[in-house]
Image (cartoon, rainbow, N blue to C red):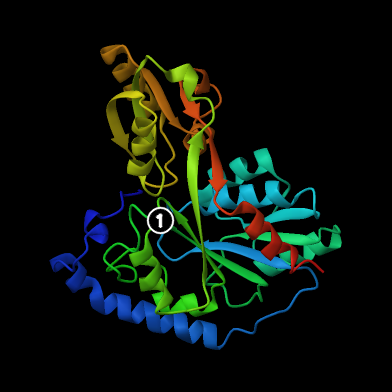
Amino acid sequence: MKINKPKFWDKNYLNLYSLILLPLSYIYRITLKIKNYFTNKKIFSAPIVCVGNIYIGGTGKTPLAIMLYELMKNLARPVVVKKNYKNQTDELELIKKYTKIITCEERESGINKAIEKKFNLIILDDGFQDNSVEKDLNIVCFNLNQKIGNGQVLPSGPLRSSLSYLKNCNIVMLNGKKDNDFEERLKKYNRNIKFFYFNYHLKNFDEFKNKKLISFAGIGNPSNFFDLLKANRLNVVQEIEFPDHYNYSEKELEKLIELEKKYNAKLITTEKDYLRIKSLHRRRFGFVPIKVKIDKEDELIEIIKKILK
């Protein structure tokens, strides 16, 4: 059974729960270091751009991987390579909808398959912490609503690795408005990081204007989706959160439809959530696809072009 992300992860201080779990976080960090120390890194003949994160979930890495594909498809033969996690079929379906994708059990085999198929730019969706692959460009994403939460590594906090891993990072992509203080905080770990900002824009929100909406989402940070709807002045009368990558049961979908009738409102969700709803029921639900807009887009393209072989 999936559970929602603990609220204490996003506090800017350590509470009792964080302190209790802190010993487990130290064990996790040590285990990760030992694993990486004994992992042999492999170099590949095609350039690899990794879009990853340190804060777990909701940082925008998958939309960014799709956007990078769009930016580079007229300059190279890009492909997205993603490890096939059983609980992430929604992300695979979303990527497949907009890009060429290779899924794999191990990233090495996926990359080799991409090279065999003559792709000359490999975009890794996730894998920043995977030390078995030599990347030509490491991009790490943060959402400025959550930043680094309480700053602790799992399970005491929301970080997949310590911020010291930023020493291997070339670019940090920040979802939100300019934040010099946060940039300086991250530069403590790597003075050479280049910072880019990106934002989400709703594609088809006009069809939901002047309607009462019930929004629901099972993503890393559902509040970011709800805030985006409200920022576009959509009339959201109720918000319902589910755990990340949530698989909706028939009973839960029926409850949502009952709410729709009760409030005389339209049910609306993310595109990822929509893809997790069985096709038989999708006609009852609306979704809002998003477009990523990156500041200094031309500069980012030039950086990627330099690693093309």
The image position of residue 113, as x and y in percent, is 79, 61
Residue with the most extreme left position: 16
Asked whether residue 103 appears in the rendered view, the answer is: no
* Residue position for label 1: 178
At horizontal 76% and vertical 74% (from top left) the residue drawn is 44
**Snapshot quadrant of residue 185:** bottom left
| 15 sits left or right of 252 in the view | left
| 100 sits left or right of 115 in the view | left
Circle 1: residue type: Lys
The image position of residue 48, as x and y in percent, is 70, 67
The C terminus lies in quadrant = bottom right
Nearer to the camera, 89 or 163:
163
At horizontal 36% and vertical 33% (from top left) the residue drawn is 231
User: Against 62, is 279 above or below?
Assistant: above
The image position of residue 57, as x and y in percent, is 43, 55
Nearer to the camera, 121 or 81:
121
**Snapshot quadrant of residue 296:** bottom right
Circle 1: element type: loop
Q: Residues within 10 Å of mark 1 (few under 14, many from 20)?
A: some
User: Against 90, is 168 above or below?
Assistant: below
Asked whether residue 220 appears in the rendered view, the answer is: yes
